[in-house]
Amino acid sequence: MNKPTIRQATIQDLQRIVPIFDAYREYFGQIKDPEMVEEFLFDRFEHLESVIFIAEQQGEVIGFAQLYPVFSSLTLQRVWLLNDFYIAEEFRGSGVGTQLFTTVKEFTLLTKSKGIELSVEHTNKKAWSFWEKQGFKQDEEFRYYFFKL
């Protein structure tokens, strides 16, 4: 199998990202909606609100990572929120996720950020293991809350 190519996506990649982004949403229990996915991603590109990296193999997008900038007022630095990270099921365990995350990490270093933040479902033990292997530690300084509207 050829090694995948990892690169930052552009708006020209929009149509190629929609199917895998929709599969990602479906994985987390959402109903497929390619039209809304396209609109959502278009808005992120148009307003420069996120950075998306894609993993490609033989012209097919097989994984992606989406980062949103947030800022720490205390340290006066940017933090990247790794909000979305997905590898197509048939490519999991092949090293694509590690390769994609390596590119994400390089990007965050180049942008002089404080670090990368992410959250994982309490039940997703495979993801815990993956992220801990990448060097992530569970936060012991702050307790995170969420207020649902």
Image: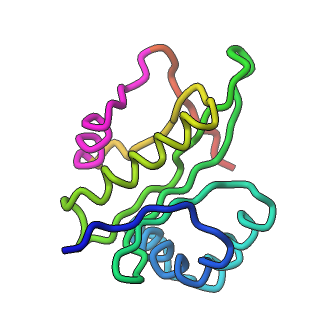
Q: Please state the extent of the stretch shown in magenta in the rendering.
A: 125-140
Please name the residue shown 54% across and 43% down the image. 107
Based on the displayed image, in which of its 4 quarters is residue 110 positioned?
Answer: top right
Please state if 40 lies on the left or on the right of 115 as rendered: right
Between residue 81 and residue 77, name the one nearer to us: 77
Q: Where is residue 130 shown, x and y percent of the image?
A: 26, 44
Q: Where is residue 17 shown, x and y percent of the image?
A: 53, 76
Please name the residue shown 25% across and 69% down the image. 91
Residue 22 position (above or below residue 83): below
Q: Where is residue 3 shown, x and y percent of the image?
A: 27, 67
Instruction: State how the image is colored.
Output: rainbow
Residue 32 position (above or below residue 50): below
Please state if 99 lies on the left or on the right of 1 as rendered: right
Please name the residue shown 47% across and 69% down the image. 25
Based on the displayed image, in which of its 4 quarters is residue 139 positioned?
Answer: top left
Residue 105 position (above or below residue 73): below
State the quadrant of the N terminus. bottom left
Outermost residue toward the right in this view: 47
Based on the displayed image, in which of its 4 quarters is residue 18 positioned?
Answer: bottom right
Please name the residue shown 57% across and 60% down the image. 52
Between residue 133 and residue 22, name the one nearer to us: 133
Q: Where is residue 56 shown, x and y percent of the image?
A: 40, 72
Between residue 88 and residue 1, name the one nearer to us: 1
Q: Magenta span has 130?
A: yes
Q: Magenta span has 71?
A: no
The number of numbered discs placed on residues in the rendered structure image is 0
